[in-house]
Amino acid sequence: MTSALPEPTAADAPPEKRDFIRQIVREDLASGKHTAIRTRFPPEPNGYLHIGHAKAICLDFGIAAEFGGQCNLRFDDTNPAREDPEFVAAIQDDVRWLGFDWAELRHASDYFEVYYLAAEKLIRDGKAFVCDLSAEEVRAYRGSLTEPGRNSPFRDRSVEENLDLFRRMRAGEFEDGARTLRAKIDMASGNINLRDPALYRIKHVAHQNTGDAWPIYPMYDFAHALGDAIEGITHSLCTLEFEDHRPLYDWCVAQVDLAGHPELLQPLLARGLPNQAGTPRQIEFSRLNINYTVMSKRKLTQLVADGLVDGWDDPRMYTLQGLRRRGYTPAALRLLVDRVGISKQNSVIDFSVLEGCLREDLDAHAPRRMAVIDPLKLVLTNLPEGHEERLAFANHPKDERFGSREVPFSRELWIEREDFAEVPPKGWKRLVPGGEVRLRGAGIARVDEVVKDAEGRVVELRGWLDPESRPGMEGANRKVKGTIHWVSAAHAVAAEIRLYDRLFSVEKPDDESDGKTYRDHLNPDSRRSARGWVEPAAAQAAPEQSFQFERLGYFVADRHDHRADAPVFNRSVTLRDTWAARA
């Protein structure tokens, strides 16, 4: 008996991917602009990654792998008040779970000394100044989309005064928000991001990596651009909201010019940190948007904080940790990213596409097992008391490489309650009083007696198993209308079966035009728990092992709670799209 997954074959190799980003990479290699490709995935460790990040991870790491390059994992840890080592560990776990690994693990904080020296260079070059305006005043001076901004009254400070003030900011002399270092670009620019943006702010907050060493921290646009340049990133891939930031990205790279000023990199060399200073190119692509979801970190955090879900890895959450616990596979998420494609056109993908990718992967790779969620006992009275036998079942009906297993069969069985009807509806093909049905792999059974309790509820069926319909017998192929699954009552293992569904009941839970918020659209049926029975081979599953429970759906052994003596299974997805009819 075996249920090992078959090894992939050459036929499983995916076709070459051709999108506009990969075409740019191919052209850069063909022209000799680059001889090696370097990318990076730069998450901020202020929360758990969600499904939207899967697209960025697959693209950043995937392109590097496809073209024989390298991809770094770099934590954008420039905002220590919101960051936590818990998130750092989870992000690394998520990246590896998706099937990728990084060439180098870096942090923006690794480069704080370089950023500081770069900022001083900009001051000496007359490209940056220390500004005393408050955040509110900066907004007032910035102007609007139709009106130019106004220069700060502190814009014309001398280089000497700016250097003195910036160094005093670094020494911790000033309170939070008292001053900022701003780039000196163009307050009349049509791109508001170029209207003298902040490069540094004062924050007296301890950092997880540098402790209390820094009372000032670089802004994202400055740190991100220079981080890419330090690491020699060739193609800096970002989502479309960063398109308007690209001119500032390019300005920071060009004005600091790390490749032309290697003295700025001395702090890294002194610490033995390698660098390949270069000129990266930022390229934007559309985000992964899926209906019936929210992907705002703030809203996901609120769901957890308010107890509306059972933590960041609740199987209803759209975090990668939650999807993993739900039974989503790395292959299914990679398939989703491939199926959605890479473009500059924002669109919303239907949730059924995500579920379809999981079904497709699990249909091919999940062994089959039998389980009963809402049990009703069927007693085969023509079998003797204590009857027991073992029946051979294929682990996968479409792939003999999965092997087979033995399933115990006895006089008393559990079947699904919904597989019996005293008064059947039109077209019914399952059990009825006096009617026959095929017991999967065991023979044809008939119900002769319906046993009810005092309230009139059916509690047991008593019937007969046709001995001529058993496997290998002459009547085994006799035609009957329906086939149902079962588990042996004497051998089945009691299990908790958690029936998960979509967390939100509407397509656009973020739409507040009707005065409601995403909290008003939580699906009350997104989680139900049942006490059912599973065949022994299912109970022996390893945590995170997926199965198709025949006729019921795809389920996964819970990664935290499942034990062989107390199985816990989460429904990953139904066999068919149950939401299509509701639309």
Image (tube, grey):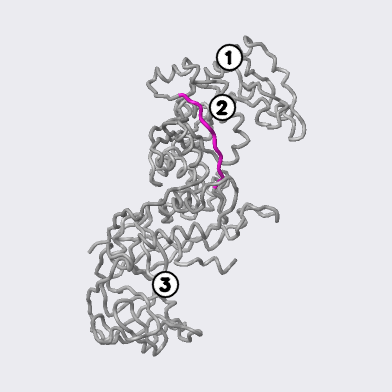
Q: Is residue 279 magenta?
A: yes
Q: Looking at the picture, which amino acid does disc 1 mark?
A: Arg
In the image: residue 539, left or right of residue 32: left
Q: Position of residue 34 (x, y in %)?
A: 45, 31
- In this rendering, the answer to whether 509 lies above or below 29 is below
In the image: residue 566, left or right of residue 344: left
Q: Is residue 76 magenta?
A: no
Disc 2 designates what residue? Answer: 222
Question: Which numbered disc flags the more N-terminal residue, 3 or 1?
Answer: 1
> Which quadrant is the N terminus positioned in?
bottom left
The one nearer the camera, 316 or 293, is: 293
* Image mark for residue 168: 1
Secondary structure, mark 1, is helix
- In this rendering, the answer to whether 49 lies above or below 310 is above
Secondary structure, mark 2, is helix
- In this rendering, the answer to whether 434 lies above or below 541 is below
> Which quadrant is the C terminus positioned in?
bottom right
Disc 3 designates what residue? Answer: 374
Part of the protein shown in magenta: 277-287
> Dot 3: few (<14), some (14–19), or many (≥20) neighbours within 10 Å?
some
Locate residue 69: give its quadrant. Answer: top left
Q: Position of residue 364 (x, y in %)?
A: 37, 61
> Dot 2: few (<14), some (14–19), or many (≥20) neighbours within 10 Å?
many
